[in-house]
Image (cartoon, grey):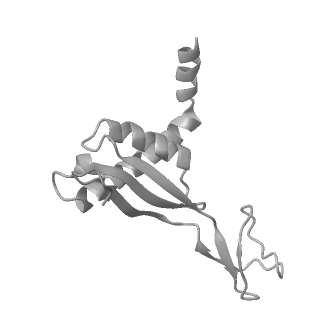
Amino acid sequence: MKNEAKTQYLCHPRLRFVIMHELGIAQNIMEIVRQSVPEGLARDIRKIRVRVGQFAGVVPDSLDFCFGVMAGESEMPRAALLIEEVPTACRCRGCGREFEMEELVFLCPHCGGTDLEVISGKELEVVDIELVDHGGEAL
C-alpha cells in the first residue's frame, strides 16, 4: 500500500513539473563537474557544493533528490550535493538601504519604497568540487 501511495504522489502533475525542472538542473551540474574534473577522476568526487538563491526558482530538496538518483547511476556514484541556500537581498533605490527579504514582498522595510534592485538570491552556481585522493584524504 505504501508504494502505491508514493507512486500516485509522484504522478501528480505539479510534482512532475518540479522534478523535471530540477532534473535538468542536476544534469547541467553533472556536466559542469565532468568538464571541471580531470578525466578518470570522476569516481573520486565526494562533494559538489552549489549556491542556490531563494529567488532562483529551484526547489533545493528536489534538486538534491534528482542529483542523488543521477549520480548513483553515473561515473561519480559517491558524489553528494551540498546546497547552500542564498537568501534574497535587495537595495532600495529610494533610500539606498540594503536588506534581506523575509518573505517575497517587494517593499522596502525602511521607507516603504517599491523601486528595489535584487542584489542576491538569484544565484545558481557550482562553487567547488571535493575529491578524495588515493590516500583517502580530501583534496
In this rendering, would 42 be left or right of 19?
Answer: left
Residue furthest toward the front? 135
Q: Is residue 73 above or below residue 133?
A: above
Q: Is residue 124 left or right of residue 13?
A: left
Q: Residue at x 35, y 39 (%)?
A: 70
Residue 73: image quadrant is top left
Residue 103 x/y as whole percent: 74, 61
Q: Residue at x 57, y 30 (%)?
A: 12
The front one of 93 and 135 is: 135
Q: Quadrant of the C terminus?
A: bottom left
Looking at the image, the residue that sits furthest to the bottom is 95
Name the residue located 20 percent from the left edge and 52 percent from the top edge. Answer: 41
* Quadrant (top left, top right, bottom left, bottom right) of the N terminus: top right
Which quadrant of the figure has residue 2? top right
Residue 18, image x, y percentages: 53, 42
Is residue 11 in sight in this rendering? no
Where residue 113 appears, as percent x and y from the top left, is 79, 80
Residue 50, by quadrant, is bottom left
State the residue in front, 138 or 8: 138
Total numbered labels placed on residues in the image:
0
**Residue 62 higher or lower than 32, as above or below:** above
Residue that sits furthest to the left in the current view: 40
Is residue 54 visible in this depiction of the protein? yes
What x and y, as percent, mark residue 42?
24, 50
